[in-house]
Image (cartoon, rainbow, N blue to C red):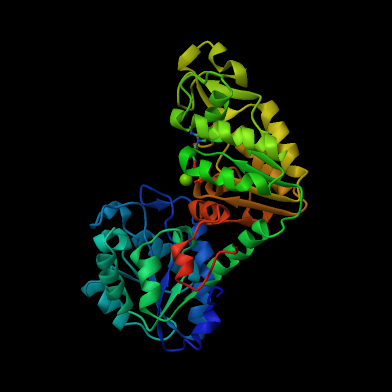
Amino acid sequence: MSLRTLESLGSLAGKRVVVRCDLNVPLKDGVITDDGRVQASLPTLNALINQGARVVVISHLGRPKGEPDPQYSLEPVAQRLSELLGKPVVFAGDTVGDAAKEAVDGLQDGDVALLENLRFNPGETSKDDAERAEFAGRLAAFGDAFVSDGFGVVHRKQASVYELAQALPSAAGLLIAAELDVLDRLTENPERPYTVVLGGSKVSDKLGVIGHLLPRVDALCIGGGMLFTFLAAQGHKVGASLLEADQIDTVRSYLAKADELGVEIVLPSDVVVAEAFSADAAHEVRPADDIEGSPWGEKGIGLDIGPETAAVFAAKIAGARTVFWNGPMGVFELAPFAAGTKAVAQALTEVDGLAVVGGGDSAAAVRALGFSDEQFGHISTGGGASLEFLEGKALPGLEALGWEPAS
Ligand code: ADP
Ligand code: MG
C-alpha cells in the first residue's frame, strides 16, 4: 500500500477536518524567529480552505511536560498563521476542553481554528497505548476526517500522529507528500556522485544513519559536534570539545566499513579551537591532529571546522549530483564559528542536481546566514524524521497513512 493522498478523502466541503501540522517554531521572548514550519504548512491548509472545509489545526510546540505552560502557548503562532493565510484564525485556549469545543462548533465553511499545544495534555506523548488512544479519541470528536501533515513528527508514535490517523478517515497532507517525494529521490537510484554531509550536536542520535548510508553514498563529510568522536577514534586528542566516548568503537567500525566499501569518509584536517563557548572567546585554527596544541591545551573547545576543511567539503559538495546535508558544521549561532556552516550552505546552492537540507537547526542556520529557501533543491522540515527515513526505519506516522518502506 502506498501513502493515502488528500484526494482519497473525497470532497471535504462543509466537513470538519482535523489537520496535524508541525508548527513547532523557534520562539524568543514570545516572538517567532523562523516561521519556516508555518510557511510549509500553508499549501495543505489553503487547499482545505479552498474546498470549503472547516479546518481544525493541531500542533505541538516545544517540550512542555503534559500540562499547560504559558511559554509554550501556540497563541503567537495563531497570529502568524492568520497573517500568512490572510484570514482570521480562531485560537482556542485549550486542546480538548470547552474552549476547543466552542471554537470548533463556531466554524463556518472555509474557517480555520488552531487548538492549544497538544503536549499540554499527558495523553499526547504517553507511553501507555490506551492513554494515547483515549486522547486521540477526544481529538477525533472534532473532525469528520484527519489530515496528517506534520512531517517533523512522523517518526513519533504519539496520539495526534499515530492513533488519531486510525480513529478517523485519514490521509497525508501536501507537505508530507512533498517531503517523501524528495526522500524517495535520495534513496532510490540517486544521481552520482552522492555526497552526504553530517554535523550538529546530537551525535549518538545521528551515528545510526551512517551505517545505513555507507553502502549507498560516494562520500560522507563529517563536521559539527560529531567530528570529535571521529578524531578520537583515530587516536587524536580533542581537548574539551563535544565527545561521546562510548561511541568511539562504533565510529571505528564505520571507518573500517567505509574502507572495505571504498566509500570516502572525509574528516576535517583543521578545526577552529576556542578558549570558551562564547562569541567573544579567543580562538585559532588548529590542525585536527593537534587540537590540544592551542594555548588552552586540554581546555580548548573545537567550535567549527577550519577553512581548509570547509574548502574540501565545499568541493565534495559542489562536484556531486546529489547532496543531503544535516547538522551545522559549527556553532553557527556565534558569528566567529559560523564560517564552516556558511561555506557548506554556499556549496549546496551550487550543486548541479538535487541538494537537500534537513534538520531544524540546519534550516534555521541557512536562513540566519542569509540564504533563501529557493537556493536549495529542498529544505526539509524534519531532521529526525528525514534521518530515520534514510536509515530505513519504520515511521509510525507514515505507516498509519498506508505507507510502507521499500524493501
Ligand atoms: P539539526 O537540528 O539540524 O538536526 P542538531 O540539532 O543536531 O542539528 O545540532 C544543531 C546544533 O549543533 C547547533 O545549535 C550548533 O550550535 C551545534 N553544534 C555544531 N557544531 C558544534 C560543535 N563543534 N560543538 C558544539 N555544538 C555544535
Ligand atoms: Mg536540532
Say above or below: 316 vs 300.
Answer: below
Q: Quadrant of the N terminus?
A: bottom right
Query: Which residue is found at the position 69% from the left and 43% from the top?
Result: 346
Task: Residue at the far front: name it.
Answer: 260
Give the quarter of the figure containing the C terminus: bottom right
Q: Place residue 311 in its image quadrant.
A: top right
Residue located 47% across and 14% down the image = 298
Residue at x-position 38% and y-position 85%: 108
Q: Measured from the top left, where is residue 48 in percent x and y?
A: 49, 79
Asked whether residue 89 appears in the rendered view, the answer is no
Q: How many numbered marks are there?
A: 0
154 relative to 251 in the view: left or right: left
Q: Give coordinates of residue 326: x percent, y percent.
A: 57, 46
Q: Position of residue 288 (x, y in %)?
A: 61, 21
Residue 315 sits above or below residue 288 on the image: below
Q: Position of residue 128 (x, y in %)?
A: 26, 61
Q: Observer-nearest residue: 270 or 39?
A: 270
Q: Is residue 200 visible?
A: yes
Relative height, residue 132 to residue 87 (above, below): above
State which quadrant residue 198 falls in: top right
Query: In screen coordinates, is 53 left or right of 223?
Result: left
